[in-house]
Image: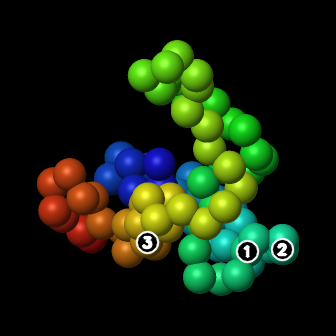
Amino acid sequence: MGVAYVFSGQSEMAENIWQNLILAQSMPPLGDTRGIVAASHDGLSTGFLTPVQTPFKYYRRLHIAATAWNLFAQLKFNPFYQTVSP
């Protein structure tokens, strides 16, 4: 979302999101400054079901995709268009 705000000219909103991401990355119990957790609390539903009709869930654990999106936001990089915001 931070990158979307930058590309739409809403840099103040982007900065607010980035500050929250930095805070989330450094807060205990899982903020070790190395990554971002997938959810703010355990058992957050993704809205998708597994083949046996049970919901996929996110947990408060470090997550590679959440960390990658955080990195994109911090670099102001849009991975879909391979562009960096000016």
Instruction: Identify the residue position indicated by label 2 in the image.
Output: 28
N-terminal label among 2 and 3: 2
Residue type indicated by callout 1: Gly
Instruction: Identify the residue position indicated by label 1 in the image.
Output: 31
Residue type indicated by callout 3: Leu
Please, what secondary structure does the residue beneath circle 3 have? helix
Could you classify mark 2 by the number of other residues whose Cα lies within 10 Å: few (under 14), some (14-19), or many (20 or more)? few
Name the residue: 62% across, 44% down.
Answer: 58
Name the residue: 60% across, 54% down.
Answer: 38
Q: Nearer the viewer, mark 2 or mark 3?
A: 2
Q: Position of residue 49 (x, y in %)?
A: 50, 22
Instruction: Identify the residue position indicated by label 3 in the image.
Output: 71
Q: Are marks 2 and 3 in contact (CB under 8 Å)?
A: no
Of residue 83 and residue 50, the one placed in the foreground of this image is 50
Q: CA distance from mark 1 to mark 3?
A: 15 Å
Q: CA distance from mark 2 to mark 3?
A: 20 Å
In the displayed structure, would residue 68 be above or below residue 46? below
In the displayed structure, would residue 67 be above or below residue 41? below
Q: Are marks 1 and 2 in contact (CB under 8 Å)?
A: yes
Furthest toward the top, the residue is 53
